[in-house]
Amino acid sequence: MRTLEKSLTSLAEDDRPLVDVLAPDGSVARSYSYRRIVGAAAALATDLRAHPVREREARPAGDPTDPAQLQVGVVTANGPEFLVADFAILGAGGAEVVVPLAFTAEQAASLLADIDVCLADAAGAARLEEWGLARVLPPDARLRVLDIDREPDGTDPLFPDAPSPDAGERLCKIIHTSGTTSRPKGVCIREAALDELIGSLRTAMPDGAYRRYLSLVPMSLLIEQVTAVYLVVCDGGTVVLLPPEVPLVGTSSFAPRAVLPHLRAARPTALVVTPALAEAMLTAADAAHADGRDPVAALFGRGEAPLVCCGGAPVDADTLRRLDAHGIPVHEGYGLSENSSVVSWNTPGARRYGSVGRPLAHVRVRTAPDGELLVKSTSLFAGYKGGDDPSGCEVDEDGWLHTGDLADIEDDGYIWIKGRKKSVIITAAGRNVAPEWVEAQYRSHPAVLAVAVVGDGLPALHGLFLVDPRASLDTVRAELDALGRERLSDVERVEVAHLVPADESLHAEFFTVTGRPRRSAVLSAVTAGRFG
């Protein structure tokens, strides 16, 4: 990744903060400079270059991984240790395999099966113990627990050698999919692909937008690695991390409400939010306006709104309009790991409510006859670890990635996502429903922390609603019924609503860390009568 390599090299001796970790009261508890992070990464990269690569079985057809390339597992919370590990693996020419702390032991083991060494912080080491080291790590894979306060400064540069001519085609990451099934796929990302994506995003986004970025979702997600780490470094900025005890958005139904006070404390210039957090921001902005306060200052502690980007699932267009009226524009986008993350984004100069914006400069899009969105770009993935996956995305012989998403594309390039081909619900009455749109409408209710709509083969649509425990279920039920009658057709409305007080175990069971419903799990629970 030439762009990132140049930025890190130029900032290696800089004493400005790369990472600020917030304290519960909003102050900066710890700060780590570029010099400190890059120095620790350089020392670790030197060790990784000398680490032996173990013998592996022959790769199946279609597997793009190189048996001779070092594979390094990374199991950390959001912290400076993640940046040290990430930069070190890049400097060592290895392939990084990041495992979310929220994964099960089975999911972690499937991703870590071929690694040579595993890097972890204290939280990651504790999680590995919970999973069982023997269960998730290969027998000869070494575990190294990183301590940023003790890592020595490197005497060698992070990138000591001139890159080989084919370095750009080398794999740099094996990224998990969002895990709506028990076994996540490993998406293989090339250095050149990620570099192309970063270049396009830097062109699309305002200059200096990432000077102070607030990280709210797990860095195990590729989009957060791109925005919270790489774009920040390219702007010479600082990534601000939540206090360790505050749940990351996507890991808990209560996280959006918990992180709101830290938006003001961090005073960010940019952040990426989920639809659930966008809804929570609107509720807070409405309350500030009703009290006669400036919503922007109340939410972000500064007079100008940051660059707020949103993705992962549809956001109700009315929510976007109302936030805009408060002076808080939200820029919705679309992406998938198979394109190294972002495909399209609404930019400050070109936004359209309800769309996911126009394609980035290096991306081309079109729709298939059945409405499926097809993508062709220079940032497409190299394939899946383990070879072709029938549940994954296909790249056809003309180089078009079949995304599995249904879309409309306007003449001026704006993309409108209609839902997933595989998640379209066919009811017992033969009616087709795209659940993502329906869920976006119901999620706009302030007491709904998460919602999943199912109904394949059932006579009516069912909805699982995780509701704020402080709210009256009867009141919320009546309001959801009124909302459905106002915004949705007879076919789209949920007829059987299962309202359950939210808790973290239910969120983890029925939703991914990006907030996508695990529909098969929800459908099984509904048909088994689990919610009455």
Image (cartoon, grey):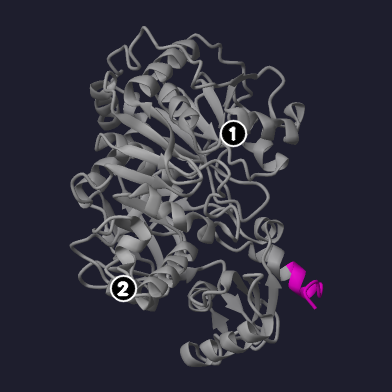
Image quadrant containing the C terminus: bottom right
Camera-side mark, 2 or 1 = 2
The image quarter in which residue 403 lies: bottom left
User: Mark 2 is on which residue type?
Assistant: Tyr
Q: Front-most of 218 and 474?
A: 474
Q: Front-most of 286 and 400?
A: 286
Percent x, y of residue 120: 58, 27
Q: Which mark is residue 353?
A: 2
User: Mark 1 is on which residue type?
Assistant: Pro
Q: Which mark is residue 60?
A: 1
The image quarter in which residue 311 lies: bottom left
Q: Which residues are magenta?
A: 524-532
Identified at 62% across, 21% down, the residue is: 56
The image quarter in which residue 282 lies: bottom left
Check contact, mark 2 vs mark 1: CB within 8 A.
no
Check disc 1: other Cα within 10 Å, few if <14, some if 14-19, many if 20+.
few
Question: Disc 2 and disc 1: Cα gap in Å?
Answer: 44 Å
Q: Can residue 512 be seen here?
A: yes
Percent x, y of residue 358: 26, 62
Of the two numbered discs 2 and 1 on the same chain, state the one appearing first in sequence: 1
